[in-house]
Image (spheres, rainbow, N blue to C red):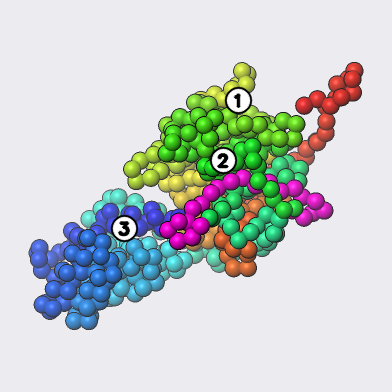
Amino acid sequence: MKYSILFLFFFSLYKFSYAQSPLPPGTYTSTNKKAVKFFEEGKKNYEVRKDEDAEKLLNKALQEDPNFVEAHSALAYLLMEKRRTKEAIAHFQKAIDINPKFFPRNFFDLGLAQLLSADYDNAVKNLESFLKFERINPNTKDQAEQYLKNAKFGSNAIKNPQPFKLVNVGEGINTSEYEYFPALTADGKTFMFTRNIRMGSGTKMAQQEDFYISKKVNDVWQTASPIPSVNTAGNEGAPTLSADGQFMFFASCMEMSGDYGSPERKGYGSCDIFYSQKQNGKWSVPVNAGQQVNTRNWETQPSFSSDGKTLYFIRGSVTREGIKNPDIYSATVGEDGKFGEAVRLSDVINTPFKEESVFIHPDNQTLYFSSEGHPGMGGLDIFMSKRQADGSWGKPANLGYPINTVTDENSLVVDANGKLAYLASEREGGFGGLDIYQFELPENMKPEKITYVKGLTYNAKTRTPLS
């Protein structure tokens, strides 16, 4: 979720150090000895991760001296780390009210906290106030400018909402478990998705990601069934289907044993993309997409073009802190039937921030994806880009509010006729956890109009169907 990156940013820079304090070391805005004592004890408890004790001590410091700027700021950061954003906002605001020039960065952090709370107008005000200060850290300035763009976009988007109504796709697909990463064939009759099955309870709780598939009969999705030839004891995720439903691409990650869910699956490191082909109505044993697509890095979330030539996917480098620089790549099938070397999409699409959940529509002209780097509501928003006459991708357009919100949005797919879109969302009224919903795309966000032909090819002499 978006919070992880933002909170990491908070605490990698601060962690109660107050390096920017204008006072001499060991001195504070409070002269109350008890307040200072409680504050310093709270700081020590925070440093050894005794957060509850740290919070109590900081509150005691504020009881002794309600105008203790450092204590308000420290408590605000601690509350932000605990996802108690609204409480944190009150303490940031109090610190600013007491002395707006003491910690200029408080304006930045208050604006960011308000952005996380979808309080866009106030976020704009405080981020603009921060940027008026002289001698601010260049990296922090860049962050502030990025968040200010999001705050301004969010403020405008809420005032100009898109026509939008989510409809749960029904009990044939959704359960009390988590369902996400939908995939759809061009005829709109086959629906595949990932289901996260929870087993056990408490400390013995385990989770298992598997693929399920549902068929549409009389406009109703039937009860989904697992795919035993692909599912393993490991996790399978983020499937995509070719337009004709004959190929499936998906991501599988390396287990502690070194394999990718089963001994037959071999990979190149971290998570790799595999594919399976439908043969005589059954899915074949999955095969690695090859070293032109897969590397020692993290490859996932594939989407296969309807012409059967280009695979789009996400690649990020694996670091101790997690996945770094996830960007959208593509690899094209050559005349030899194998994928050529994957290339990163241009900076028109990719940003220094996170991109994920890429989907190429069957029109092969419209790309949908999620990004943190383009102006949006905060966190991951869904964007659309159109292929230009020269083959390049055009400037991405945000799908707008309320399709996008302050929370993360991703995993969007659009049916072939461009009318219905599908995504995963966790909200009241569902079957529990993440459910898959559908909605009608606004006209300005629809792909190009296309048609398709579905049929069988026969041997001219024997009149028997060909595979």
On the image, the x and y values in percent for residue 421 come to: 66, 52
Dividing the picture into quadrants, the one containing residue 15 is bottom left
> Relative to 301, does residue 176 appear above or below in the rendering?
below
On the image, the x and y values in percent for residue 338 come to: 59, 22
Q: Does the magenta portion include 208?
A: yes
Q: CA distance from mark 1 to mark 2?
A: 28 Å
Residue type at mark 3: give it: Phe
Q: Which residue is mark 1?
A: 333
Q: CA distance from mark 2 to mark 3?
A: 39 Å
Secondary element type, mark 2: loop
Q: Which numbered tag is attached to residue 232?
A: 2
Q: CA distance from mark 3 to mark 1?
A: 44 Å
Residue visible at 52% across and 42% down?
234
Which residues are drawn in magenta?
Answer: 200-221
Residue visible at 57% across and 56% down?
178
Q: Is residue 297 visible?
A: yes
Q: Earlier in the sequence, mark 1 or mark 2?
A: 2
Secondary element type, mark 1: loop
Q: Earlier in the sequence, mark 2 or mark 3?
A: 3
Q: Specify the quadrant that holds the N terminus.
A: bottom left
